[in-house]
Each structure stands twice: as C-alpha cells, then as structure tokens.
Image (cartoon, rainbow, N blue to C red):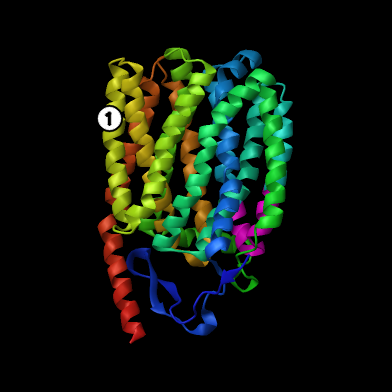
C-alpha cells in the first residue's frame, strides 16, 4: 500500500500528568524515537478504509443477520426468550474477554497475524453453530464466535491508533462506521431471506462463507502497521502492569465506561427489537428488516455528519451533545412505551437514540485511544472488553424485564444512556480534556521555539 512516511520533526509522545491522566502529544521528540509507521494517503487511505470496514463488518453481520430468526429459533430449540437472548450475550461475552487477551498479543506479534487467525477461527465457529443441537450448545459456540471476532475488532481499532490520533482518528472511525453501517441495514433483510430459503442454520453457513471471503481480503489487502521496534512482550506480568496503568487514568476509564454504556443502549435495542416489533406490533420478518435498517440509518447518518462537525468542534464537545440528545430521545421512547403509543411514536425516538449513539461511536474511542498510543492494542482491548462486557450484562435485562411490550427495551436503553451521562460529567469531564489539549498546544509551541 503506497504511503507517506510520518514527518519526524513534529512527532510527539504522550507523557503522564497529575492524577494518572495522560496528555497527548505534549512535546517534540528526537528523531530517534519517532514513530516510523507510514500514514496512508489518497488511494491507499481509501483502500485501508474499505478493507478495515469490510473486516470489522464481520461482527455486526454475525450479530444482526440472525435477529429475524430469534422467534423461530426459540420455537425449534424449545427455548425461552431470555435463553435465546443469551446467545447474543454469549457472543458479546466472547468479544469482551477475547479482546483482553488478544489486544496485548497484537502488541507483541503484530496486528495482521492476530487478525488472520481470528477470521479463520470465526469461519470454523460459524460451521459449528449451524449444527448446534440445543440452545446451550449454540450459546457456547456463540462465545467462541465472539472470541474469534474479538481478534478482528481489537486489531482494527489498534491499526487506527497506530496511524492516527485525535481528530484524524475520529474522522477515520467515522468513515469506517459508514462501511460498517451497511451491515446492520442489510443483515436483517439478508437473514430474513436466508430464513425463508434455508432456515436459521443456513444463516450460520452463510456467515462461514463470508468469513472465508474476508480472510482472502485481509490476506491480500491488510498490511502490518506495528513495526517490530514498537512491539511489547506478551508477558502476563507486563500485560497486567499495562492494564493497571490504563486504569489509573480516570478520564480514560470514564471514556471506556461511557463507550460501554452507549454500546449497551444499542444492544438493548438489538436484543429486544425483534420481539417488540414482530410479536407486539405484529410486523412480519420483511417489515422488521426494513424498519431495523431505517433505525440503523440513524447511526450511519450521525457518523457521516461527524467529520463535518469535527471541522468546527472538538470530539469531546460532539460527544457531550450526543449524550444529551440520547437522554432526551430515550426519555421520549420510555414515555411512548409506557403509554402504549402507536408504533410511529416509538420509532421516531428510537431513530434519534441511534443518531446519538452514532455521535458517540467515533469520538469516544478516538479520545480514549489518543491518551495511550504507547499501548494501543491493550487500550483498544480494554475499551472493547468493557463495551461488550457491559452489553453482555445489560442486554439480558431486556428480556428479563420484558412486559410483552416495548417497556422493557425502553427502560434498559434509558437507564444505560442516563448512567452514561453521569459518567461523562463525573469521570470524563469534557472541560478537563479541553484544558489538557490547551496545555499540550502550549508545550508543543514552546518546544518548537
């Protein structure tokens, strides 16, 4: 992939500040310690966006394609609604735990090797899922799917941090989400078609074939972005010390928790929407696929508006606005659910919840990972583990508190977003990030003179 080398003179490193936080890019550094990773531009940049987007779309496809099949799957395997939703919990649990292990591994052996291994394992798990004889076996296999998918998720995020930080990282993540966002729109419709043609087991066969194609895409189109000189030994003690250092950064921890809570709001919708829209509001599988795609479009629109917003505002300001919008939208959704309002009065606030989540998705990880570029794999792993870990705990609540209407889904989504707002104000403190950035600029300017 043609690339432009990073200029050596302005390259900077992060240094600790009081309270365990980290200032990003506070001072120029000698050429001997500059980061040698090439930065793609032009066609190389576009190619990287498309390849990474295709690869990380494997996760949404794995989760969303079989959503229309959940009621059918429950009937065929003799499972309850909470048991079926635990198959979603299983993949999210695997995605979370897998990233904690595979993130540091990618810091040690490089991104490409971990990514290719994960895709190959995912294909194998998909074949096993197609032949699962019971809901318990299917849930266990979904955990395996999650662990293998974690390899793709964590390395993709680390690749972004290997190459970019700050606004440029948020911009790249916005472009990636456009590619990723096609998956939630197409996946339920694809699942509905496969369900009619082959049954729910055929959905997992199709996922195995998709993974095989993506393996070839990664093999041919994904270069290594972590030079040998920047790799870190994958020892348990060193890994634990790295995680301990990350957890001492209060702002980083707050951003990680906020990302997890906004992600949980999304997956409460993912887990509950098929039952709410199909069983309570009486939509068929095709209608559900269309409406699921319309709501997914809210997330996509937000991520594509985000690069334009970044030209004027910092990521922390956009993130704050997104959380505020999410608070208003989830409250409106809860009121509509409690009053048993018509479907349209449920769908409108749902769309704006997805829009709010879309504003948080690029900016939260960009802010978090920019603070710890020296351990991008581990930082991305902790971010992903908390996202999927929280979602795996919160998502089953959607089924457990279900009242046969939209109330259970709305309660969980509202609680997650409002708790995220508390984390934003108490731990993240966007004004503190702005102050740190101002101090960074001052230090860099002083170093330049």
The percent coordinates of residue 344 (x first, y second) are 34, 21
Main secondary structure of the magenta stretch:
helix
Provide the residue designation for mark 1: 331
- Please name the residue shown 51% across and 84% down the image: 31
Of residues 389 and 208, the one drawn nearer to the viewer in this rendering: 208
Residue 66 can be seen, yes or no: no
Left or right of 236? Residue 315 is: left
Identity of the residue drawn at 31% across and 44% down: 322
The quadrant the C terminus occupies is bottom left
Q: On the image, which quarter does residue 149 sit in?
A: top right
Whether 270 is among the magenta residues is no
User: Where does the magenta region start and end?
Assistant: 102-118
- Asked if residue 114 lies in the magenta stretch, the reply is yes
At x 28%, y 62%, the residue is: 434
Q: SS at mark 1?
A: helix
Classify residue 124 by image quadrant.
top right
Counting from the top left corner in percent of width and height, residue 420 is at 34, 42
Residue 256 on image: x %, y %: 42, 50
Instruction: State which quadrant residue 94 falls in.
Output: top right
């Amino acid at each position: 992939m043609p690339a432009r080398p990073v200029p050596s003179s302005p390259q900077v490193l992060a240094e600790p500040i009081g309270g365990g936080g980290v200032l990003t890019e506070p001072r120029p550094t000698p050429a001997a310690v500059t980061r040698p990773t090439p930065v793609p531009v032009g066609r190389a940049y576009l190619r990287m966006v498309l390849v990474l987007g295709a690869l990380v779309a494997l996760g949404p496809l794995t989760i969303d394609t079989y959503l229309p099949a959940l009621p059918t799957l429950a009937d065929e395997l003799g499972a309850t609604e909470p048991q079926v939703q635990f198959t979603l919990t299983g993949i999210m649990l695997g995605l979370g735990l897998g990233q904690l292990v595979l993130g540091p591994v990618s810091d040690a052996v490089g991104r490409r090797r971990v990514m290719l291994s994960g895709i190959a394992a995912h294909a194998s798990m998909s074949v096993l899922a197609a032949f699962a004889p019971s809901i318990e076996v299917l849930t266990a296999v979904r955990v395996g799917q999650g662990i293998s998918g974690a390899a793709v998720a964590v390395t993709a995020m680390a690749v972004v941090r290997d190459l970019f930080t700050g606004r440029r990282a948020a911009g790249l993540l916005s472009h990636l989400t456009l590619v990723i966002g096609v998956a939630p729109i197409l996946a339920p419709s694809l699942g509905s078609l496969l369900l009619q043609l082959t049954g729910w087991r055929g959905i997992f066969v199709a996922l195995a074939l998709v993974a095989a194609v993506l393996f070839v895409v990664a093999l041919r189109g994904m270069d290594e972005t972590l030079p040998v000189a920047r790799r870190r030994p994958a020892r348990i003690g060193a890994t634990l010390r790295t995680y301990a250092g990350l957890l001492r950064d209060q702002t980083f921890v707050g951003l990680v928790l906020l990302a997890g809570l906004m992600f949980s709001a999304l997956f409460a919708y993912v887990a509950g929407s098929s039952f709410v829209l199909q069983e309570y509001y009486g939509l068929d599988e095709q209608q559900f696929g269309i409406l699921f795609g319309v709501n997914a479009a809210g997330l996509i629109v937000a991520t594509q508006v985000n690069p334009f917003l970044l030209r004027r505002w910092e990521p922390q300001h956009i993130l704050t606005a997104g959380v505020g919008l999410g608070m208003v939208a989830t409250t409106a959704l809860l009121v509509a659910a409690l009053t048993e309002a018509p479907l349209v009065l449920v769908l409108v606030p749902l769309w704006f919840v997805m829009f709010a989540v879309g504003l948080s998705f690029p900016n939260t990880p960009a802010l978090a990972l920019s603070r710890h570029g020296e351990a991008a794999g581990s930082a991305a792993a902790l971010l992903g583990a908390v996202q999927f870990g929280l979602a795996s705990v919160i998502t089953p609540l959607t089924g457990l508190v279900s009242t046969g209407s939209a109330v259970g889904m709305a309660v969980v989504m509202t609680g997650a977003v409002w708790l995220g707002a508390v984390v934003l104000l108490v731990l993240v403190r966007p004004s503190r990030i702005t102050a740190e950035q101002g101090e960074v600029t001052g230090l860099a300017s002083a170093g330049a003179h």
